[in-house]
Amino acid sequence: MRPIEQLVQQYKDRELALPIWCENGTLKLIDQTKLPFKEEVCQIASVHKLGEAISSMKIRGSGAIGICGAYGIFLAALQTNGDPQKVKKAGDFLKSTRPTAVNLMKTVDEMVKETKSSGQNLIARMEEKAVEILNRQLDFEYQLGTYGAEVINDGDTIMTHCHSGAFGGAGYGGRALSVIRTAHEQGKKIHVYTCETRPYLQGARITALELKKFGIPHTLITDNMSGFCMSEGYIDKIVVGSDRVAANGDLANKVGTYMHAIVAQANNIPFYTATSSHTIDFNTPSGRDIEVEMRNASEVTHFNGMPIAPEGTQALYPSFDITPSSLISGIITEKGIISKPFETNLRKVSSKVIV
Ligand code: RI2
């Protein structure tokens, strides 16, 4: 059995969620649009199909689409018999599927760069590299979870937004849920308020599913209830994931994050983002330089194909927003918790940063 296929058993043995895997040269993934009611497996036989799965959010979460970048380039190498030009073309296509989460761009570039030095055994090297990237990201989740759990006290109520968890990452807890899961596993009595996160409902459908699996008490709220919950003192701190952290610490994350951060500051509630080195983008000076993906308005006017607004209603769907670093209490990474001044301290960590 190939190394990339052996991972499936390792994940099963460790009861981890594999967002994407490889069997007999075909990629497979759980269709996240069907969660929590069905764990439907999609067969991905081409890079084009993988791109479609990413852009239609069958697989989503900055960590998980980063792994798609690695597995997609392995699939391209398999299907082109390791033709470096065709592999690079496949990489450019994958990078075009979603513009905001930097992990996708970084893992594609890391894999394509490998083609230049792999020579004859390109396919074997691509497979090795894809497994290496997945295992590295899984290690990050355990490490950042341990650092992040340091800010979680016994008895805390933590609010999350969107889904930054196992299905959206490398299988332990993504970023935010790696912090929360680690604190829970340390025996801390915690409760999570999870925002449903319209319109895709990552929070209601996937975060609630994973918190239930982890045995972590939680309460589902709609996004517009966060102000009430914070002003009433229900929330002790907020931990969110990350799609891109700019060089000055500005954060691109699911739309609504900025709103929660403003209310958190107004109520003196600590606001953290859990990220990892491969999501920090030193080539992006500030949040103003991050492209925010604009998704199809029909995802706002419909849910599961059912209209929720009058026919012809205009809608807007910025998939992310930018939270200024001034609103962030700390940036949790696999190298530790980075505090202000972020510009300086992110650079200091960058010397230890892998990518
Ligand atoms: P990790 C999601 O975006 C959200 O912004 C969420 O915070 C992040 O990606 C989760 O990824 P989408 O892909 O931070 O659901 O856990 O649009 O890597």
Image (cartoon, rainbow, N blue to C red):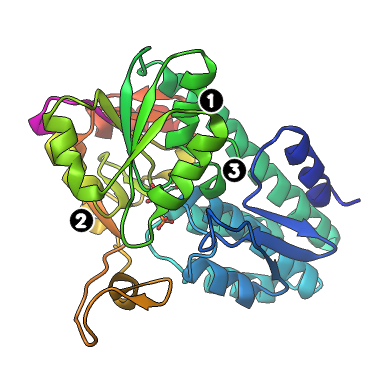
> What is the quadrant of residue 101 in the picture?
bottom left
Q: At numbered mark 3, what does the secondary structure look like: helix, strand or loop? A: loop
Q: Is mark 1 within 8 Å of ligand 1?
A: no
Find residue 112 and report its image quarter. Answer: bottom right
Badge 1 density bin: few <14, some 14–19, many ≥20, Cα 10 Å: many
Q: Is residue 219 one of those drawn in magenta? A: no
Q: Residue at x 33, y 66 (%)?
A: 293
Instruction: Assess whether residue 266 is covered by the magenta stretch.
Output: yes
The CA span between labels 2 and 1 is 30 Å
Up/down of 123 relative to 350, above or below: below
Q: Residue at x 37, y 76 (%)?
A: 306
Q: Nearer the viewer, residue 259 or 310?
A: 310
Where residue 92 sits: x, y (%)? 53, 71
Give me the residue at 17% from left, 32% from top.
230
The vertical placement of 214 against 37, above or below, is above
Say which amino acid is labelled 2. Arg
Magenta highlight range: 265-271
Q: Which residue, given by chain and number where applicable, does mark 1 sit on?
A: 143
Q: Quadrant of residue 280?
A: top left
Residue 298 visible in the picture = yes
Q: Which residue is mark 3?
A: 170
Which is more toward the observer, 98 or 115?
A: 98
Q: Nearer the viewer, residue 30 or 280?
A: 30
Q: What label sits on residue 94 in the rendered view?
A: none
Q: Earlier in the sequence, mark 2 or mark 1?
A: 1
Q: Is residue 340 left or right of residue 56?
A: left
Query: Nearer the viewer's eye, disc 2 or disc 1?
Result: 1
Specify the amino acid type for callout 1.
Gln
- The residue wearing badge 2 is 288
How would you rate the neighbour count of disc 3 (Cα within 10 Å): few for under 14, some for 14-19, many for 20 or more?
many
Q: CA distance from mark 2 to mark 3?
A: 29 Å
